[in-house]
Every structure is written in C-alpha cells, then in structure tokens.
Image: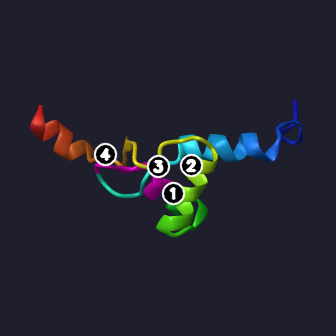
Amino acid sequence: MSVTNYPDSHLILRAIRNARPKTLGECERWVAVGDTFALGSTYAIELCRLYDVDPHEKIGGVRCLTCEERES
C-alpha cells in the first residue's frame, strides 16, 4: 500500500491527532496543531474544528525525565 492511496483529508486528520506541543507539560491541542502546520491560533483552532477535533482538549507535551524521577 502506498501513501498515495490515502486521501489528503485522512493524512491531515492523522497529523492533527498526532500533533504534540514542543513545550513542557500540557497545552491545548490547537497549540500543537499550530506548531505542526505553522499556523496562528485562529487558523489552528479552525483546522481542528474542520476535522471535528476539540481544539481546547488538553494534551501532553514534552516530558522532563529528570523531573519525573525526582517526583517519584
């Protein structure tokens, strides 16, 4: 199977769902989508809504393994 067999909309949806923020901790999904697609907040939120993904859903970002070890 080739990537050309996937519709563009399917690939965009996968990218939106798998986008992760570049900052430590949690943030809203639109931030990660904005980083992934190089969009501002308005367009990132609009893109999420266009694909029926909650732009304000909290998602995890980069984790600091040293900080996690200290907490445990």
On whether residue 28 falls in the magenta region, the answer is yes
**Sooner in the amino-acid sequence: mark 3 or mark 1:** 1
Q: Are marks 2 and 1 in contact (CB under 8 Å)?
A: yes
Give the quadrant of residue 46: bottom right
**Where is residue 61 shown, x and y percent of the image?**
37, 48
43 is higher (above) or lower (below) than 7:
below
Q: From which residue to which does the magenta span run?
A: 25-33
Q: Which residue is mark 4?
A: 63
For discs 4 and 3, the disc positioned in front in the rendered view = 3
Image quarter of the N terminus: top right
Residue under pointer 2: 49
Q: What residue appears at the point 56 percent right and 50 percent down from the top-left corner?
A: 48
**Which amino acid is tagged 1?**
Ile
Which amino acid type corresponds to the residue marked 3 in the rendered image? Pro
Give neighbour class at mark 2: few <14, some 14-19, many 20+ (Cα, 10 Å).
few
For the residues labelled 2 and 3, say whether their Cβ atoms are less than 8 Å apart.
yes
Magenta stretch containing residue 13, yes or no? no
- Does residue 32 appear to the left or right of 68 in the view shown? right
Quick one: 12 or 23, which is closer to the camera? 12
